[in-house]
Each structure stands twice: as structure tokens, then as C-alpha cells.
Amino acid sequence: MRIDIITILPDLLVSPFSHSILKRAKEKGLLEVNLINLRDFSTQKQKQVDDYQYGGGAGIVMMCEPISNCIEHLKKERNYDEIIYVTPDGELLNQKMVNTLSLKENIIILCGHYKGIDERIREVYITKEISIGDYVLSGGELAAAVLVDAIGRLLPGVLSDETSALFDSFQDNLLSHPVYTRPEDFKGLKVPPVLLSGHEKNIREWRHEKALERTKARRPDLLKDSE
């Protein structure tokens, strides 16, 4: 999979993709992440990519031309399955959406700043708009990093145990079941006996039951969504 991220702050995204699971994914050739500096596509002398908004009001807007120039340049090199704009008013990111995106081959992620991007870019180029939560960040870079991390870990061969992702929270609209490791007894709190039994069927049933209990208690809305 190839993901091209359009940003005015490429240095901000170097670290998230240089460690842990995403680093291994890149080293294995399973995931390619490219940071595209939007200012390189500005025709302005000072590499300007923003201007005051029509109609007045506080805040500036990212201009059409640099974004259009950048996207058109990238599209000449390959076809893209999705051109994503990360924005607070986009569709709320969830595991089902991540699962679908992990099956794509080429994706562009556009990071906004200031008051956002000119609406005409959204109308002409953007195929999907995604929000990572009901709050506002200084820019789209951190949201892009979250999205890439969520997608990248699902790619076949990225995780050492590929079945691990199948039992994460939000798969099948359930939160994850409780997990334990050594020691067996910690300050009088003991690991549930079923997990020590070696009986796979009983362990699976226990885990499903606990996942259901936790979801009912903490996120009952997930169960309603699955109905």
C-alpha cells in the first residue's frame, strides 16, 4: 500500500512513521508513506498556500491552486483509490472504515490548517472526508498519523501474529475482553482460572462473554449499531 500525505508541516510526521509497527511495515515493503510538502506546489514567491477568506471573518483559508497542483501532479503518476481530507466535520472514523481502507492500494491524505481548505477543492477532488473525533486540532497531521497507524497495522504481514488484529476492540462492534500476563497472582488478584485451563473453547466463550459485558457497560451504542 502507498499513502501520500499532503502537508505544510512534513517534519511533524517523520517521527510517527519511524518507530514500532509502522517502521517494520515500511522496512518490509508492505507500506510506503510519502510526505508531500504543499509549499513546493505554490506559485507564489513566498510559497504562500493560504489567504484571507471571502466575506470577512477571523482565520485564513488554504488556497485552491497549491492543493490542485499537488494532487494533479500525484495523479499523473498513479491512480488513487481515495483522496481523503481529514477534517472535524468529516465522517467519524471507526474500525469498519479502517478495515475497508486497508484493502486499498493508493491513498492521498490531505491535511488542513487554519479555517480549512477552499470548498471547491472538496467538491472537485476529495472522495472521502474523515474526522477522528468531535474536537479541533491545530492541523490535520496528527489525524493523518492516527489514520495511517490504524490502517497500516491491518496490512497482511505487518503484525507478527496476524490474528491479533481480529480480536482488537471495535472488531465485531465489541470492546476487547480483559487480558492478563504473568505473574499469576498480583497482590492477591489472580488470573481467572479459565485462562489457565488450556481449554480453547471455554476460553473463547469466556472472552466473548467478557467483551460483551464490557461493551454493554462502557459503549452500549456499539451494540445498537450492530442491530
Image (spheres, rainbow, N blue to C red):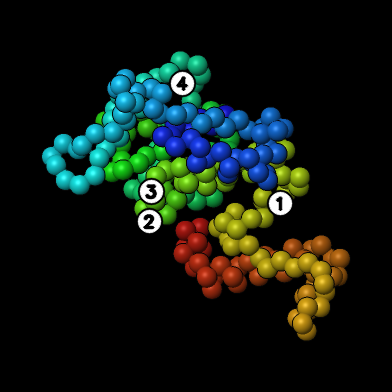
- Give the alpha-carbon distance from disc 4 to disc 3, as whole Å: 26 Å
Q: As drawn, which residue projects farthest toward the right?
A: 198
Question: Circle 2 — which element?
Answer: loop
* Disc 1 versus disc 3: nearer the observer: 3
Question: Circle 3 — which element?
Answer: loop
Q: Which mark is residue 135?
A: 2
Q: Which mark is residue 61?
A: none
Between 48 and 192, the residue placed more toward the observer is 48
- Name which residue type carries label 3: Ser
Residue indicated by mark 1: 164
Residue 102, position in %: x, y? 58, 38
User: Do the CB atoms of the residues marked 2 and 3 lie less than 8 Å apart?
Assistant: no
Residue indicated by mark 4: 74
- Up-down relation of residue 40 to residue 188 (above or below): above
- Name which residue type carries label 4: Leu
Question: Circle 1 — which element?
Answer: helix
Between 43 and 120, the residue placed more toward the observer is 43
- Up-down relation of residue 38 to residue 170 (above or below): above
- Up-down relation of residue 146 to residue 66 (above or below): below
> Which of the marked residues, 1 or 3, is nearer the chain's N terminus?
3
> Which of the marked residues, 2 or 1, is nearer the chain's N terminus?
2
Image point (25%, 40%), residue name: 60
Question: Circle 4 — which element?
Answer: helix
Residue indicated by mark 3: 138
